[in-house]
Image (cartoon, rainbow, N blue to C red):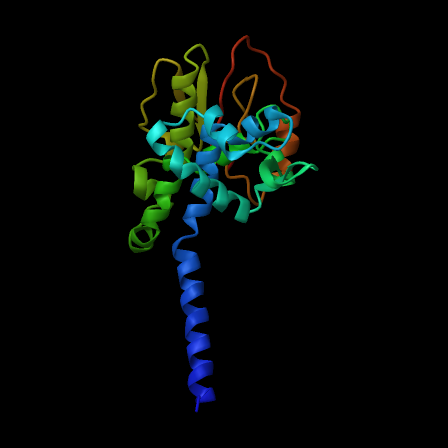
Amino acid sequence: MVNLADANHDAELLQAQAHVWNHIFNFINSMSLKCAIQLGIPDVIHNHGKPITLSQLISSLPVHPAKARCIPRLMRLLVHSGFFAQAKISEDDDQEEGYVLTSASQLLLKDNPLSVTPFLMAMLDPILTRPWHYVSTWFLNDDPTPFNTAHGRTFGRTVAKAIAKAFPQLDCIVFDLPHVVAGLQGTDNLKYVGGNMFEEIPPSDAILLKIILEKREAAVILAAHISPVNNWLDLIIGPIG
């Protein structure tokens, strides 16, 4: 005879294990989606104009022949996640199915003005995912953010240097409180300037506001009234005081 108490315990234990395992492997969902975007799968399906078969999809992707057998696994996962769906190739053929986009994957197309692909790729970049591995260490030290713990510098400095390196023709400024930028060394097209955003802002053609909290509304209003007066682009990054 089955003991109901034991049966209930087993069911509860199974559910608990499934819950833990789901959290352990949750990263597979986001990384599989990143992989699909890097391979161009959403655009390949979209450009095909009709449901695309697995063989057609594989032949359209720049994958190594030895890895082609793994594409079905990737697609099964992405279908399960709701990013792709399967539909009949034609009404005359009840057997063969092809992949089509869903509303979610339409937001991943390169030409879609509402595309979230750039944001997705940025958020899943190792530079931004690495700090999550240091959260416990961050709780034990006096670093301001896990990003500092992981990379040894602030996020603002990292962004500024990345933009300055990518666009050497721009003159960039990291504008922060004087004690924050004191002693920091710039580069050929990147310099650190101390000050207070509510008192005076260096003339610029574009501004990237960062860490806008209690004074957010005032900061946005202030930024909206800044007029570009230079022929170059100044990048201003930092807290506003």
Q: Is 23 or 106 nearer to us in this picture? A: 106
Residue drawn at x 64%, y 29% is 50
Q: Quadrant of residue 66?
A: top left
**Residue 110 x %, y %:** 57, 25
Q: Is residue 144 visible?
A: no
**Residue 26 x %, y %:** 43, 52
Q: Quadrant of residue 98?
A: top right
**In this picture, residue 82 sits left or right of residue 90:** left
**Residue located farthest toward the bottom when viewing the structure as drawn:** 1
**Residue 185 x %, y %:** 31, 23
Q: Is 104 or 201 nearer to us in this picture? A: 104
**Residue located farthest toward the right when viewing the structure as drawn:** 91
Q: Is residue 80 above or below residue 106?
A: below
**In this picture, residue 151 sits left or right of residue 207:** left
Question: How many numbered badges does the structure rendering display?
Answer: 0
Q: Is 192 or 76 nearer to us in this picture? A: 76
Quarter the N terminus occupies:
bottom left
**Residue located farthest toward the top when viewing the structure as drawn:** 231
Residue drawn at x 31%, y 37% is 151
Q: Is residue 95 above or below residue 163?
A: below
Residue drawn at x 49%, y 31% is 55
Q: Is 92 or 201 nearer to us in this picture? A: 92
**Residue 118 x %, y %:** 52, 30
Q: Is residue 62 visible?
A: yes
